[in-house]
Image (cartoon, rainbow, N blue to C red):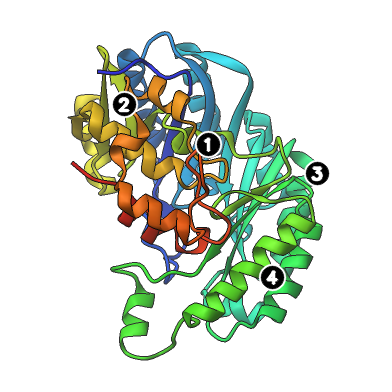
Amino acid sequence: MTNVPSLFGLYVHWPFCVSKCPYCDFNSHVTNHVDHDRWCQALLRELDYYAALTPGRVLGSIFFGGGTPSLMAPRTVEAVLERAAAHWTWAEDIELTLEANPGAIDCERFQAFRHAGINRVSLGVQSLVPESLGFLERRHGVREALEAIETAARLFPRFSFDLIYARPGQTPAQWEAELSQALDLATGGHISLYQLTIEQGTRFQQDVARGAFTLPEDDLALDLWAVTHALTADRGMPYYEVSNHAVPGQESRHNLLYWLGGEYVGIGPGAHGRICVDGTFHATRQHRAPDVWLKTVLRDGHATRQKEPLTSRARAEENVMMGLRLRRGIDPDAFRLACHGFDVSDLLDGPMLALLRAEGLVADGWPLRVTDRGMPVLNAIIGALVQSS
């Protein structure tokens, strides 16, 4: 059992893309035709279902992710926003984000999304180097990326964009030059910087297995992280989460909701959620296959594949693993309040914590915080530190 958290958001998954990127393991699909009216109807029906389970909340953020949500009909986005406003009270400063690819949007379409109510966009730029865009098989070029950034800056109160680094053959000097250019463009005060990782089931996994390319060695990856950390800090956009950087006050509120253990509804194919029903937190997951999801929602009103109660300990463990991603770390008093009396120290391997502190990978004292030195090996630290039940 747990209290309903004050943070509440809505995630909307649009699963369709123009093409599948070779590094992507998200629930994304390529199709020649989408019946936008039926998809709009289905999203609204699933939204209605989950709104009935979560009455009385104050909605702080809505995030349209994918896939490529900028391929949605703007009227569908507007309809979802209107229905969400009918179900929940909106925070005065509600954040309404839509992900967009530079190659799948133009100025007119940006304007339509702004008119629909979107007040923040997140652009999948991924690189400002032509050869790297080719390697990543992005459908846009550098010129389209720059035009999309300029248009986003002009039309939206807030915007962000992503880059992928630690690419094959990339040197620290090359990355420093590219990142410096990107920070000049990041006038929205937020940028996400991800090291290239090889995910299971992706085309890149097959390429690496057959020796088509290799990722940078660990020492080089650490050098690239050091460049990232130093340059963003120098430019006033330090990391607040392991891969996300912002001018203070421009952090992604929706993503912070995840990392701070908030409550959120997830609708659309494969969407995950964390909702509190009758005092108990539940993990929800929707059917992944778009056609199955669509038919099920139109028949039953929702396509929930999983609605699993979370024990207090399971939720507390999840909050530790998410909270350690944040530079601020985990405040023990706030953690105890959010996790129904659990002490964060009860979930940790004590001897391992002492060792990690002695190695300078975890900060001494409280809050519980991974150091700058430890962030590049965050996943290993979490795996070693958290005692799962």
Residue farthest bottom in this picture = 211
Image-quadrant location for residue 315: top left
The earlier-in-sequence mark between 3 and 1 is 3
What is the CA distance from the residue labelled 2 to the residue labelled 3? 46 Å
* Number of residues whose C-alpha sits closer than 10 Å to that of mark 4, classed few (under 14), some (14–19) or many (20 or more): some
Looking at the picture, how far across and down is residue 2, in whole percent?
30, 18
Between label 2 and label 1, give the one nearer the viewer: 2
Between label 3 and label 1, give the one nearer the viewer: 1
What is the CA distance from the residue labelled 4 to the residue labelled 1? 27 Å
Amino acid type at image mark 2: Phe
Q: Relative to residue 209, is residue 68 depicted above or below? A: above
User: Which residue sits at x=71%, y=67%?
Assistant: 179
Amino acid type at image mark 3: Arg
Give the residue pinned by disc 2. Answer: 342
Q: Are marks 3 and 1 in contact (CB under 8 Å)?
A: no
Looking at the picture, how far across and down is residue 216, in whole percent?
50, 82
Whether residue 326 is visible to the viewer of this picture, yes or no, is yes
